[in-house]
Amino acid sequence: MSAIDVFLADARSGLDRVSPARARELQAAGALLVDIRPLANRQAEGEIPGAVIVERIHLEWRLAPDSDWRLPGVTAESTVVVLCNEGYSSSLAAADLQRLGLARATDLEGGFRAWAAAGLPVVEGGSPAVP
């Protein structure tokens, strides 16, 4: 295995990764879906209705439970599902959030593309990221 394969496997070892159907159930129950994809991807492929857009470079500051810049309502008990295009960078991001105290952070298996392939709702993309 390459170094990145080991790194990814290590990140995923602490996650309870969720399928698109389970992510939708969690969202309906109040979980926060966080889309970390770049604007170009969101414009080309769309977005998940109700997902919060947080650029990857701001993620830790916007979601760490003790950050002065966290999103309103985010606590250590919040359930957060991070998503990217295909479920790779979201695994690394979710593991980072867990290390910062967000124990219920995880990611979407297969990312946005798995969500769309499952026939779940998608809206035209291009929303601005949370500043």
Image (cartoon, grey):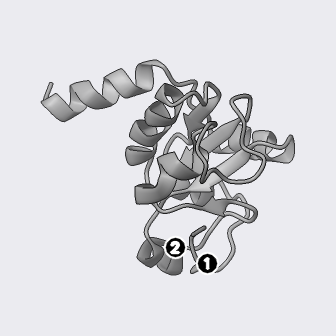
Q: Position of residue 19 (x, y in %)?
A: 62, 38
- Residue under the point 86% across and 40% down: 29
Asked where in the image residue 93 lies, by quadrant, the reply is top left
Q: Position of residue 10 (x, y in %)?
A: 34, 21
Q: In terms of secondary structure, where does tag 2 sit?
A: helix
Left or right: where does residue 79 sit relative to residue 130? Answer: right
Q: CA distance from mark 1 to mark 2?
A: 8 Å
Q: Position of residue 6 (x, y in %)?
A: 23, 24
Q: In terms of secondary structure, where does tag 1 sit?
A: loop
Q: Does residue 4 sit above or below 32 in this rendering?
A: above
In the image as oriented, which residue stretches furthest toward the front? 68
- Residue under the point 75% across and 62% down: 50
16 vs 116, nearest the viewer = 16
59 vs 70, nearest the viewer = 70
In the image as oriented, which residue stretches furthest toward the right? 29
Residue labelled with disc 1: 127
**Dividing the image into 4 quarters, which one contains the C terminus?**
bottom right
Amino acid under disc 2 = Arg
Amino acid under disc 1 = Ser
Is residue 114 in view from this perspective?
no
Left or right: where does residue 118 sit relative to residue 2? Answer: right
Which of the marked residues, 1 or 2, is nearer the chain's N terminus? 2
Is residue 35 in view from this perspective?
yes
Left or right: where does residue 16 sit relative to residue 10? Answer: right
104 vs 114, nearest the viewer = 104
**Dividing the image into 4 quarters, which one contains the N terminus?**
top left
Asked where in the image residue 54 lies, by quadrant, the reply is bottom right
Mark 1 and mark 2 residues within 8 Å of each other at the beta carbon: yes
- Residue under the point 38% across and 44% down: 88
Q: Which mark is residue 79?
A: none
Residue labelled with disc 2: 42
